[in-house]
């Protein structure tokens, strides 16, 4: 397949995944990664998607910054920051196929549990003040930091806590988006200092992807106001399971070959 065709297909995936995150406040990287990695390779796909997602994050935060719940942002960011260096270490040490299999298991587990939880309850209930911050939730946020450091997509674990603490979709979206913006700035700084990511191919990928990014941003904004939240979350979690299954067999095949 020609390089331009690969980049255009990756752009189409970016459009679909950015539309999802424009509605929900999470999901762009975790949904796009298995498909983009098959086109561009995992080691390029992670910085490619993380950098592009900065555009969406800046857009959402600037539009809705007054709705950020700073107390929850600080709590989540603290625990996620503890796990981020561990994930960065794993990204720099493990082979791409092993990373694919590990991430796919995470995606399938979180997607299936989120789908069943949303199907049963319709919507997460807010945790009472001072509750919902037990050791299990703190560990989930810490593990989310590890996964984000390794794959640029620790959102599924963070969402388990945030969906309880931030039940209203508007504040959920902007508070989590600010978190993604912060973590991705750290990753981009680390990649820049290492000097192993930015090259001509990456630059070409960004240029091709820009129209898809902006189209996804505006469609996501529109759908955020229109789409039933429960139905959309069911679709997101279902797609997460599907994407994880595709990535699992792709990575396993590479390991066995």
Image (cartoon, rainbow, N blue to C red):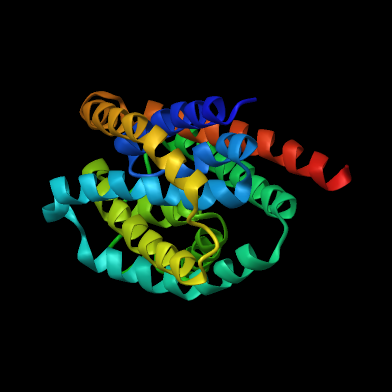
Give percent across and percent down for residue 194.
52, 70
Pick out the residue farthest to the front.
200
Locate residue 78: give its quadrant: bottom left
Q: Nearer the viewer, residue 32 or 161?
A: 32
Q: Quadrant of the N terminus?
A: top right
- Residue at point 39%, 44% (across, down): 26
Instruction: Please indicate, yes or no, whether residue 171 appears anywhere in the rendered image.
Output: no
Give percent across and percent down for residue 99.
68, 54
Q: Nearer the viewer, residue 122 or 141?
A: 141
Locate residue 20: give its quadrant: top left
Position of residue 166 in the picture relative to residue 35 (left or right): left
Position of residue 246 in the picture relative to residue 32 (left or right): right
Pick out the residue farthest to the right.
257
Give percent across and percent down for residue 19.
35, 31
- Residue at point 39%, 59% (across, down): 184
Give percent across and percent down for residue 137.
47, 64
Query: Is 226 placed above or below 208 here?
Result: above
Position of residue 84 in the picture relative to residue 218 (left or right): right
Q: Nearer the viewer, residue 67 or 252?
A: 252
Pick out the residue farthest to the left.
66
- Residue at point 73%, 58% (across, down): 95
Q: Quadrant of the C terminus?
A: top right
Q: How many marks?
A: 0
Instruction: Please indicate, yes or no, whether residue 113 appears anywhere in the rendered image.
Output: yes
């Amino acid at each position: 397949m020609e390089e331009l065709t690969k980049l255009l297909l990756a752009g189409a995936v970016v459009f679909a995944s950015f539309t999802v995150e424009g509605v929900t406040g999470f999901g762009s990287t975790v949904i796009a990664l298995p498909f983009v990695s098959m086109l561009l390779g995992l080691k390029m796909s992670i910085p490619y998607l993380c950098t592009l997602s900065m555009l969406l994050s800046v857009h959402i935060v600037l539009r809705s910054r007054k709705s950020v719940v700073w107390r929850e942002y600080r709590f989540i960011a603290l625990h996620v920051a503890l796990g981020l260096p561990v994930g960065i270490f794993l990204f720099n040490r493990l082979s791409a196929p092993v990373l694919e299999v590990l991430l796919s298991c995470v995606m399938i587990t979180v997607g299936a549990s989120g789908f069943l939880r949303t199907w049963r309850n319709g919507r997460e209930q807010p945790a009472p003040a001072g509750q919902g911050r037990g050791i299990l939730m703190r560990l989930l946020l810490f593990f989310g930091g590890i996964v984000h450091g390794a794959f640029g997509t620790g959102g599924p674990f963070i969402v388990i806590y945030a969906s309880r603490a931030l039940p209203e979709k508007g504040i959920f979206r902007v508070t989590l988006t600010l978190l993604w913006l912060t973590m991705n700035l750290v990753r981009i700084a680390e990649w820049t200092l290492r000097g192993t990511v930015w090259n001509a191919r990456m630059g070409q990928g960004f240029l091709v992807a820009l129209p898809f990014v902006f189209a996804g941003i505006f469609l996501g904004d529109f759908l955020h106001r229109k789409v039933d939240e429960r139905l959309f979350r069911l679709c997101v979690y279902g797609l997460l399971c599907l994407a994880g299954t595709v990535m699992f067999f792709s990575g396993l095949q590479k390991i066995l070959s």
